[in-house]
Image (cartoon, coloured by chain):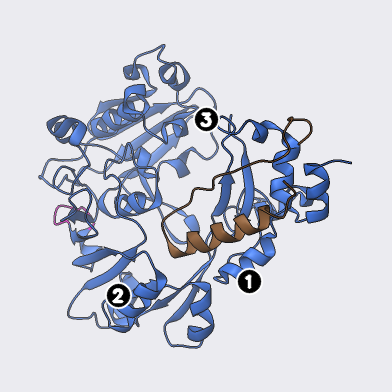
């Protein structure tokens, strides 16, 4: 992140409007938020 | 270029299937078993159809409809084995650059007009013309002059495809494409009826009525936005005697719990199960596992988020995701963690029969390593 000159990063995850996609996306969000910043 | 992150591969699926033994579509079951009186199947999809224009279709719901409503030179049989469909005989030149297809002369469009080699020439030129903006046009890479046409430097009429007569189609390639025949079973390579496409113009393929069909079924009742429609047997299809189903009803069902209710009410003959449902229904009659061959991935928008251009940032994101847990604990539907970008079960090494995904496995590319992800993210 130093290389790109940022301390934090905000990402928007876009997925299908289905139950499975929502569950998957929530899981991915949870996993990625464990990265600092 | 947008780089793709690998998240999950080898999507399996599990479903409850009504006992359909008496309702089979295969020749085998018709010879051994009595067919049901009502040849009707009730199926669900997760989304509505986006287009029935085979040149433009690029998502699975639409492509699934097109496999039923249209037909190309070949079809894929069991284990993706190529079978002749509209082609009856194929010759390939020694250098692998010229394909000559003999076509059957007894397939008709739903208005009764015969399907000819010209319908292929018309369709293919339309797919590659940049103004059509066909999502899968790039599959024509390797067909003579495709590159120049795609860049707008040459007319689509210069594409390496011609119809010397009604039942002969000749294709010229710019380089040998070993998998070319497999592509021909894909809807982007299906024929199109010029008179219908021109009649409806930009509206072609936007509703059941504004589409021409040459396959086993025709679409009925899709208005472009509605959530129920059907496929009805096409009486003009050349192989109609091997089609036993009269009707396939489709409805959009977004949630597995709604699907399960409809299945239990006998309103659906098949319903996909989510992970939480699998545990309760795994021992039910009708429970079946299907092995798929597709990969789910996160697509990183490097134009919108500059940081995603950095390879370490992308590696960190990929390594922070526990793919095995996603497959086994979250989805629980038969999915497996990916071995690479290409899914398991998709293709095999022709010599050893080993799965391509195993042959191409690079562990570091798909591994889960949160500690390393954090290091990549914020190096000491």
Q: Specify the colour of chain B.
A: blue
Q: Is residue B236 magenta?
A: yes
Q: Chain of mark 3?
A: B
Q: Nearer the viewer, mark 3 or mark 2?
A: 2
Q: Using a 10 Å C-alpha cutoff, classify the residue at mark 1 as few (fewer than 14 neighbours), some (14 to 19) or many (20 or more).
A: few
Q: Residue at x 59, y 52 (%)?
A: B347
Q: Are dots 3 and 1 on a single chain?
A: yes
Q: Residue at x 47, y 44 (%)?
A: B182
Viewer-proximal residue, B185 or B59?
B59
Give the mark, 3 or 1, whose residue is nearer the N terminus.
Answer: 3
Classify B325 as above or below B172: below
Q: Which residue is mark 3?
A: B96
Q: Which residue is mark 1?
A: B329
Q: Which residue is mark 2?
A: B268
Classify B80 as above or below B310: below
- For the residues marked 1 and 2, what is the alpha-carbon distance in whole angstroms? 27 Å
Q: Quadrant of the N terminus of chain B?
A: top right
Asked which secondary structure carries label 3, the reply is: loop
Give the mark, 3 or 2, whose residue is nearer the N terminus.
Answer: 3
- For the residues marked 3 and 1, what is the alpha-carbon distance in whole angstroms? 48 Å
Q: Chain of mark 1?
A: B
Percent from the top left, x then y, of residue B139? 46, 34
Q: Magenta segment, principal secondary structure?
A: loop
The stretch of residues the image draws in magenta is: B234-239
Left or right, residue B209 beside residue B46: left
Q: Quadrant of the C terminus of chain B?
A: top right
């Amino acid at each position: 992140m130093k290389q790109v000159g940022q301390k934090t990063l905000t990402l928007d995850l876009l997925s299908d409007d289905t139950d499975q996609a929502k569950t998957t996306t929530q899981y991915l969000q949870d996993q990625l938020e464990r990265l600092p910043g | 270029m947008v780089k793709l992150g690998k998240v999950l591969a080898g999507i399996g699926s599990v479903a409850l299937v009504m006992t359909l033994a008496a309702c089979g579509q295969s020749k085998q079951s018709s010879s051994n078993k009595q067919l049901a009186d009502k040849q009707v199947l009730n199926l669900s999809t997760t989304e509505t159809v986006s287009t029935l224009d085979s040149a433009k279709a690029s998502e699975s719901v639409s492509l699934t409809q097109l496999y039923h409503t249209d037909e190309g030179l070949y079809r894929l049989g069991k284990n993706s084995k190529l079978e002749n469909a509209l082609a009856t005989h194929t010759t390939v030149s020694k250098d692998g650059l010229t394909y000559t297809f003999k076509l059957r002369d007894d397939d008709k469009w739903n208005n009764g007009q015969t399907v000819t080699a010209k319908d292929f020439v018309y369709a293919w030129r339309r797919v590659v013309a940049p103004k059509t903006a066909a999502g899968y046009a790039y599959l024509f890479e390797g067909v003579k002059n495709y590159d120049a046409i795609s860049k707008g430097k040459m007319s689509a009429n210069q594409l390496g495809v011609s119809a010397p007569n009604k039942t002969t189609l000749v294709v010229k390639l710019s380089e040998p494409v070993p998998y070319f025949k497999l592509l021909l079973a894909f809807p982007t390579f299906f024929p199109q009826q010029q008179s219908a496409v021109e009649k409806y113009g930009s509206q072609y393929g936007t509703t059941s009525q504004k589409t021409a069909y040459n396959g086993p079924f025709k679409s009925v009742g899709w208005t472009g936005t509605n959530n129920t429609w059907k496929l009805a047997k096409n009486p003009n299809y050349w192989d109609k005697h091997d089609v036993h189903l009269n009707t396939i009803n489709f409805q959009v069902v977004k949630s597995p719990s709604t699907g399960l209710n409809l299945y239990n009410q006998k309103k659906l003959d098949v319903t996909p199960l989510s992970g939480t449902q699998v545990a309760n229904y795994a021992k039910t009659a009708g429970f079946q596992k299907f092995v798929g061959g597709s990969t789910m991935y996160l697509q990183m928008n490097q134009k919108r988020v500059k940081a995603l251009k950095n390879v370490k940032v992308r590696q960190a994101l990929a390594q922070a995701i526990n793919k095995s847990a996603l497959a086994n604990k979250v989805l629980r539907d038969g999915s497996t963690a990916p071995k690479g970008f290409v899914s398991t079960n998709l293709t095999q090494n022709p010599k050893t029969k080993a799965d391509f995904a195993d042959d191409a496995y690079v562990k570091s590319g798909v591994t889960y390593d949160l500690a390393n992800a954090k290091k990549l993210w914020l190096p000491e």
